[in-house]
Image (cartoon, coloured by chain):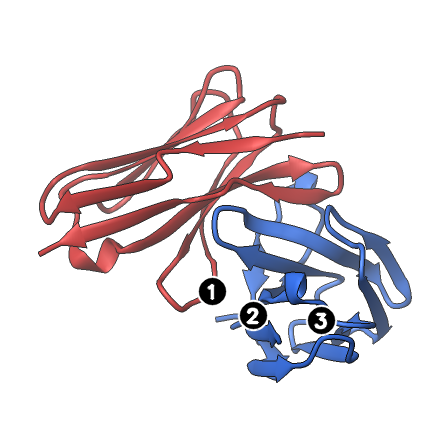
Chain colours: A blue, B red
């Protein structure tokens, strides 16, 4: 498996609290992604990064922000968690853009429950 | 925007039976990728198809890319309990990947 770790692996938090999830890679890949996975919806892109300090929104970005201050770290923040953000969050990395035939490597995931 | 659909959503098979999942895109794709996610695990890259009509095999798994590059299929011959999981297809959507909702395969021993 590619060198990707996510922390925490599990978290339970209350509605309205801020939450930060961390993704760390040791592969020196330029592209990093945050997805959420919910039953029946597959993997939906939240935000992605194409370099240090370079990020952009994905399909379901409302309520989320990201930061990437180093190549190896990509942080996902829920400013004020809501129950609809209860999900499994996956980080992924890639050596290139989707259209240039690079595959994605996924982290182990973080299971977040918002009560 | 681009949509990627997969059918069926679920498939239950007896061990030894064959299994096929189909992936359809609303737009022509430059390539298509397949991933497998075991229960409780994370998606793992299986293969990428690039050429129109391309067929690739990995042991009991056969992957096909349609002639129009808008659809793809994954066929598993003689399923085993180790094949259990959800199979996703993914295609480029702008700069990123768009994943299908997946097909969940259950294999009864």
Are discs 2 and 1 less than 8 Å apart at CB? yes
1 and 3 marks on the same chain: no
The earlier-in-sequence mark between 2 and 3 is 3
Q: Which residue is mark 3?
A: A28
Are discs 2 and 3 less than 8 Å apart at CB? no
Q: Chain of mark 1?
A: B
CA separation, marks 2 and 3?
14 Å
Q: Which residue is mark 2?
A: A107
Q: Nearer the viewer, residue B48 or B42?
A: B42
| Left or right: where B71 falls relative to A11 | left
Mark 1 vs mark 3, foreground winner is 1
| Above or below for B24 versus A89 | above
Quadrant containing the C terminus of chain A in the rendered view: bottom right
Residue at image coords 55%, 57%: A37
Q: Secondary structure at mark 2?
A: loop
Residue B106 on image: x %, y %: 23, 51
Residue at image coords 60%, 82%: A12
Q: Nearer the viewer, residue B83 or A17?
A: A17
Q: Which residue is mark 1?
A: B42
Q: Chain of mark 3?
A: A
Residue A68 on image: x %, y %: 84, 71
């Amino acid at each position: 498996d590619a060198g990707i770790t996510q922390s925490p692996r599990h978290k339970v938090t209350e509605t309205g609290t801020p939450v930060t999830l961390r993704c760390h890679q040791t592969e020196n890949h330029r592209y990093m992604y945050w997805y959420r996975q919910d039953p029946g919806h597959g993997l939906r892109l939240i935000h992605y990064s194409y370099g240090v300090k370079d990020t952009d929104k994905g399909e379901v970005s409302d309520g989320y922000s990201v930061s990437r201050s180093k190549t190896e770290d990509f942080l996902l923040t829920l400013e004020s968690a809501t129950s609809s953000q209860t999900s499994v969050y996956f980080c992924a990395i890639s050596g290139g853009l989707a259209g240039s035939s690079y595959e994605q490597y996924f982290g182990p995931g973080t299971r977040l429950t918002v009560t | 925007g681009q949509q990627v659909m997969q059918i069926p959503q679920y498939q239950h098979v007896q061990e030894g039976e064959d299994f096929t999942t189909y992936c359809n895109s609303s737009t022509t794709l430059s390539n298509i990728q397949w991933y497998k996610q075991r229960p409780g695990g994370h998606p793992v890259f299986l293969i990428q198809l690039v050429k129109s009509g391309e067929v690739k095999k990995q042991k009991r798994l056969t992957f096909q890319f349609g002639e129009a590059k808008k659809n793809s299929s994954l066929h598993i011959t003689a399923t085993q309990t180790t094949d259990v999981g959800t199979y996703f297809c993914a295609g480029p959507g702008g700069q990123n990947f768009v994943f299908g909702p997946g097909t969940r395969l259950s294999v009864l021993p």
